[in-house]
Amino acid sequence: MSTAPPPEPDEPGSGDSSRAAPLRNRNFRALLGYRIFTILSYQIVAVTAGWHIYAETGDPWMLGLIGLAEVLPYFCVAPFAGYLVDHLPRRKLGMAAAAGLAITPLLLALLTSGLIAGSVWLLYLPIMLTGMVRAFLGPVYNALFARVLPRDQFVRGASLGSIVFQSALVLGPAIGGLLIKPLGIPGVFLLASIFALVVIVFLGRMDVTEPAQQLQREPVFASIAEGARFVFGHQILLAALALDMFAVLFGGAISLAPAFIHDILDYGPEGLGILRSAPALGSVAMGIWLARNPIQRNAGRFLLVAVAGFGLCMVGFGLSTAFWLSAFFLLLSGMCDGVSVVMRSTIMQLSTPDHMRGRVSSINGLFVGSSNEIGAFYMGSMARLLGLVPAVVIGGFVTMGVVATTAWRAPKLRRLDLRELT
């Protein structure tokens, strides 16, 4: 039996303040399915490719090159992806991106199985395709998010989205790490491809009215510039994005997990899965708490303290030589990151006009999404120059310095009350 689509976000009387309200929305549940399976596919590929490349080369710099290979095409495509999301049907773009996400692990499976002969350097070509595809995933999600939920459910919806996102970050590496031995590297890549194809099913089940702005055509570069002017003219949004970007850039020690497992902690691929999952597990726990206790007052202070705590956890992880202590520090870092993710997502959703969500989300991706890959390249390069432990410890202290600078230079963020944005 079909159900009527939910009220549009700006319709009066559409709100439901109960904690479970977003989950009663069929379209929102389908959107969460889209989110979790895209992240599962991507994370399985990331952990499996990282394990294989480091096992073949033994060089942490090669792990950094994984991030660089992904971020360069991401940077080139992201601005245009945001423009397309604002001007074309968003569900169809999401389906096309999911199809592209399925192709990457198929190519990696062929390369690692020996069906296509070549050196380890060929593995970076499919990873470049992943960067291009990922440029569409975030903008599609954020644009559809605002179409299926009313504004008064944005905070709880963002918390639930964070729980799903971080749950996938827990499960993806765990699945990849645990299945490498029984399935083999090519078999794990094939599983990631299947997960990407499931995304198309979830998007096909959604019934969403596309906004009228999508029918209007603007010059591409002028439209992209409009989104950039909006972000750079909004101190709170810009500061939140920059804070997250630099924290991930300098504190992204998780990209070096394969090297820590091999050289310091002496564990197998299952240990890599645990380390890669630990931050996301902490974020899930924090997301559940925030869904039940959404932060409104002093949101800016919570954000700043959380990012500083993230940097401190990276210092602890870098100094630890015990596997479970290292996992504990990563768990705590995930709890801190969970606050940051929910706060930043909520600020972006509440601040952005609907007709600009694709472009603003793409700029958000350039700040935050790309910083993971640039951070991986930075950490790999620093580890090669200074060693694993100094690279991680220095990055953690730099992250805390970034927090202090942001608190000084962005007083509006420091004093932020989310009720002022609604």
Image (cartoon, grey):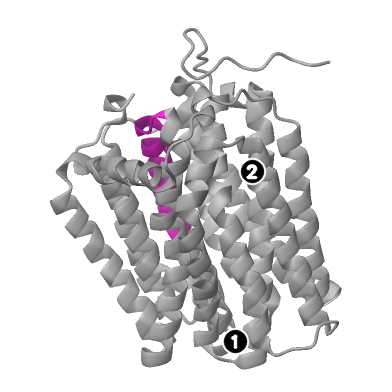
Whole-percent x and y of residue 292? Answer: 49, 31
Per the model, the C-alpha gap separating discs 2 and 1 is: 40 Å
Q: Which residue is mark 1?
A: 262
Quadrant of the rendered structure where residue 396 is? Answer: bottom left
Quadrant of the rendered structure where residue 417 is? Answer: top left
Q: What segment carries the magenta color?
A: 332-353
Q: Looking at numbered disc 2 in the image, what kind of residue is underneath it?
A: Leu
Residue depicted at x 44% and y 30%: 355
Q: Is residue 45 visible?
A: yes
Q: Is residue 49 left or right of residue 412?
A: right
Whole-percent x and y of residue 130? Answer: 62, 63
Secondary element under disc 1, as helix, strand or loop, is helix
In which quadrant of the rendered image does the N terminus lie? Answer: top right
- Checking the image for residue 307, the label placed there is none
Residue depicted at x 27% and y 70%: 398
Compare residues 273 and 83 and report the one nearer the observer.
83
Q: Is residue 286 visible?
A: no
Mark 2 crowdedness (10 Å alpha carbons): few <14, some 14-19, many ≥20: some
Labels 2 & 1 near each other (Cβ < 8 A): no
In which quadrant of the rendered image does the C terminus lie? Answer: top left
Residue 286, placed above or below residue 151 = below
Q: Looking at numbered disc 1 in the image, what kind of residue is underneath it?
A: His
Q: Which residue is mark 2?
A: 93
Q: Earlier in the sequence, mark 2 or mark 1?
A: 2
Residue 180, placed above or below residue 224 = below
Whole-percent x and y of residue 50? Answer: 62, 77
Q: Nearer the viewer, mark 2 or mark 1?
A: 2
Q: Is residue 107 left or right of residue 271?
A: right
Secondary element under disc 2, as helix, strand or loop, is helix
Residue 384 in magenta? no
Q: Is residue 184 left or right of residue 199?
A: right
Residue 420, placed above or below residue 270 = above
